[in-house]
Amino acid sequence: MTAMSWGELAERVLAAAGSSRYLLGVAGPPGAGKSTFAAGLRDAINARESGLVAEIAPMDGYHLNNAELRAAGKLTRKGEPDTFDAAGFVENLRRLRDAPLGAPVPWPTFDRRVDEPTPGGIVFADQRIVITEGNYLLFDDDEGQEWSAVRKLLDECWYLDADRRLLEKRLLRRHIRGGRTVGAARMKVHDSDFRNADRIAGTRGRADLVLRGHQGRYYLE
């Protein structure tokens, strides 16, 4: 595998992005480190440009709220494809693509401390590079819902992978910090997260670039 530095990854994006808004997706299984990677890439891009040109539009902001999931009997499956507002995610991606630079576009974020989305957590305006990260960016019509429209709105989509044992370690830690017991966290990982990961792995071949994270470095596969 070939190691990729932050500089090389940032230059790849900057070379592809023009003067209009550019949308890059970062897909991959839960626990792969997509949020950390997206933040590192954003910072590397901004370090090479004058001003804030890149920002993150996380898919997690489109989690349905807990009350809605509870009413639908889906709360224990939170994180699976039908527990997101896929249509809202697609609509705002399209708004980001179509809006002229400088026009404000609010974007929701996700607060892990309360396990709920935060409306308008980020407002895009002059940022011409948008990095959106999430599990289901590469889903197609076979998976149903609105997900199939996502890839068509992205200029490029990368896939971030990780060893399954590392995924398990990170996910267990995430769920325990979120308030689950060790037993409940293991059940969530094996009954839900890994089922999602297997479905997401089937989309890997649709990515423009596949990277694997290992000990803080990223390798091209």
Image (tube, grey):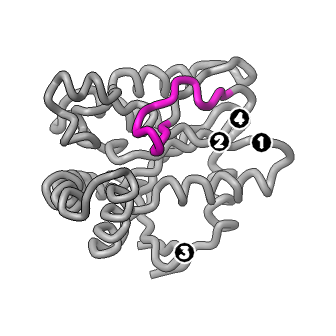
Q: Quadrant of residue 59?
A: top left
Query: Label 2 is placed on what type of residue?
Result: Glu
| Residue at (27, 52) in percent of width and height | 203
Rendering coords of residue 56 (x, y %)? 59, 42
* Amino acid residing under circle 1: Leu
Q: What span is in magenta? A: 110-124
Type of the residue with mark 3: Gly
Tag 2 residue: 55
Q: Mark 4 vs mark 1: which is more N-terminal?
A: 1
**Disc 3: which residue:** 216
Q: Are marks 1 and 2 in contact (CB under 8 Å)?
A: yes
Label 1 packing within 10 angstroms: few (<14), some (14-19), many (20+): some
- Return the disc, 3 or 1, that comes first in the chain's sequence: 1
Question: Label 4 crowding class (10 Å Cα cut-off): few <14, some 14-19, many 20+?
Answer: some
In the picture of the structure, the residue carrying the numbered disc 4 is: 127
Judge depth for marks 3 and 4 and give the one in front: 3
Q: Amino acid at mark 4?
A: Gln
Residues under labels 4 and 2: Cα distance? 7 Å
